[in-house]
Image: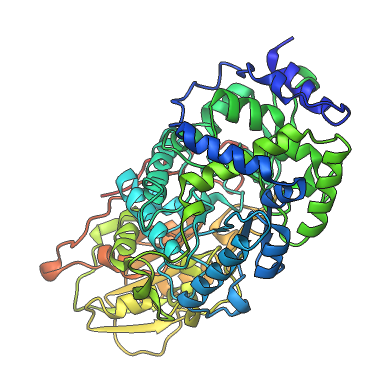
Amino acid sequence: MNSRFVFAALVAGVLFAATPVMTATATVTGSDVWPMLRKPQPLPAADEKRIAAIVARMTLREKIGQMTQAEIRSVTPEDVQRYSLGSVLNGGGAWPGMNRQAAVGDWLALAQRFHAASLASSAGIPVVWGTDAVHGHNNVYGATLFPHNIGLGAAHDPALVEQVGRAVGAAVRATGIRWVFAPTLAVGTNPRWGRTYESFAADPALVEAYARAYVRGLQGNLRGDGNVLATAKHFIGDGGTFEGVDRGDTRASEAELAARHGRGYVGALEAGVQTVMASYNSWHDTAVEGGAQLPQGKMHGNPYLLTTVLKQRWGFDGFVVSDWNAIDEVPGCRKDSCAAAINAGVDMVMVPEDWRQFIDNTVAQVERGEIPQVRIDDAVTRILRVKLRAGVLDSVPGARPDVGRFAGKQAPLQPKALARQAVRQSLVLLKNEGQVLPLRRGGRWLVVGALADSLPAQTGGWSLTWQGNDTTNADFPNGTTVLAALRAAGAREVVYSPDGVTGAVGAFDAVIAVIGETPYAETAGDVRVPAPLSLSGVAPQTQDLLNNASSHSAPVVSVLLTGRPLESREALERSAAFVVAWLPGTEGGGITDVLVGGQGGHARYRFSGRLPFPWPSCSQPEAACPPQFPQGFGLR
């Protein structure tokens, strides 16, 4: 029998055995389809001895507390002290005091309160706060937001991504937070998936290069003033689910899972990433007849991938964290109880609301022998190892020289110039008939489309709120819309009409139509079969808008805001120029930097972005129709 099946059986047997079995799996290496990686730099022996001494003096309840992560809407600093919690997080749409406009100083003050409470707990171990800073410090009012990953992927520039990671880390540290749930390393295979914009590209090699760069940018040497813990997520195969259904079933052979969906983790792990987040999706090994032998199913309950591959074969010595209430999706588990996930290799469990019951239930499971004590000690050791490496055990949130610079409510938190550069490099030109672009300064322009004056549309999901909805321009006080950027770009006159119908007298030199999707995030953003995956399908108002735009006898320049490639034949035909701007974030000026020429009509910045995904020619990706534009396409 293959060793991976022996391992799976052993771990499954934990649920019924009274004695630990984890030590029996030390030599299991996993299938050769998973490459052997450079092993992480081990901690000095003195540090490992320090960690072992801490674990040895902890009670079982303190250990389970250390493995528990609660959300700030359901936990107080007093709770952290009482239960010796190891971590807190803020989900999308959670702010200190539930004040959307909480200042940077408010975030820092809350982080310091949590820290002080953890030191006063019986365990005395500093808490670590995690946040979804996925395109800037995007939960914080006034933050500068970068393009989402799909836009960064279009730039094809790992050095730029490293700079972005460094800037995000500095912003997060300014609020006293030490851990970022990024980067997402999904390799998107079906743009129906509502998280496609969180994927850098369909090319595993580019995802691997970006993973290395992003982790280096965020983590640095882990001890710098602006360094934070990075998270490689979501392990593994989240971008490959059948029909693009979020949290669905990834149907792939083990070789394909490794070669396509594993490459990003190779880059992240070799760059020293300290945490890995398990994925909601399931895995079905298509190469095994019947699939009965493999420990498949939900990733949070998969010991072969979480332990045999990730921790043993790849030598990952950080910790695995679960996703939001994801243990609830493992068969036989609930939101507050899941021995199977811990036995499979999850070390820290994200239990946003039900964390008290989770602690009680997990303590009881260990006492009944359903979870081996050695598995608990391993999990706590991994958590403490990461906290020690990152300096969490020996420092105070906000103990850095530049925190005072971020005390104002509307502090941008990131260098706006870098975000603007990222937007410029992300733009992909699909059409430029008659060399309409760059637009000449001094012209008279008509700007159409409600999205032209919408920062929520530019920033997309994971922007102040989880889905990116329920926000207005006022929620992004330092942002610049496309409309505002065009008004500042040197036109003789800019006329704005949301629907393209205007009573303005006189001819226009160009009509700029800003079209596309409105904000969404995971699950809500899925376009389920058989709905068409097309621009007209997700934004049915586009046809009327372009009809009105075309009535002005001026060339139409379409700027598409989108989190995924969309069949757009009709819009392309109606446009003289067509620019894919993805979800650019708060710096709309990066779009006009490329759209509008300099003095004499010459381009100030040239289009350099290339498609990170193939551009579909039909509205049903399952039909295997050839792409209208191949991956890597982009006019110059």
311 is higher (above) or lower (below) than 380: above
Q: How many marks?
A: 0
Q: Which one is in front, 540 or 179? A: 179
**x and y percentages locating residue 161 in the rendered image:** 36, 49
**Residue 374 sits in quarter:** top right
Left or right: 70 as drawn, with respect to 271: right
Is residue 539 shown to the viewer in this render?
Answer: no
Q: Which one is in front, 241 or 18? A: 18
Quadrant containing the N terminus in the rendered view: top right
Residue at screen point 52% across, 44% down: 386
Residue at screen point 53% across, 26% down: 314
Q: How is the image coloured?
A: rainbow
**x and y percentages locating residue 454 in the rendered image:** 47, 75
Left or right: 599 as drawn, with respect to 422: left
Q: Which one is in front, 436 or 46? A: 46
**Residue 190 sits in quarter:** top right
88 is higher (above) or lower (below) than 442: above
**x and y percentages locating residue 300 in the rendered image:** 71, 40
Left or right: 523 as drawn, with respect to 152: right
Which residue is outermost to the left? 600
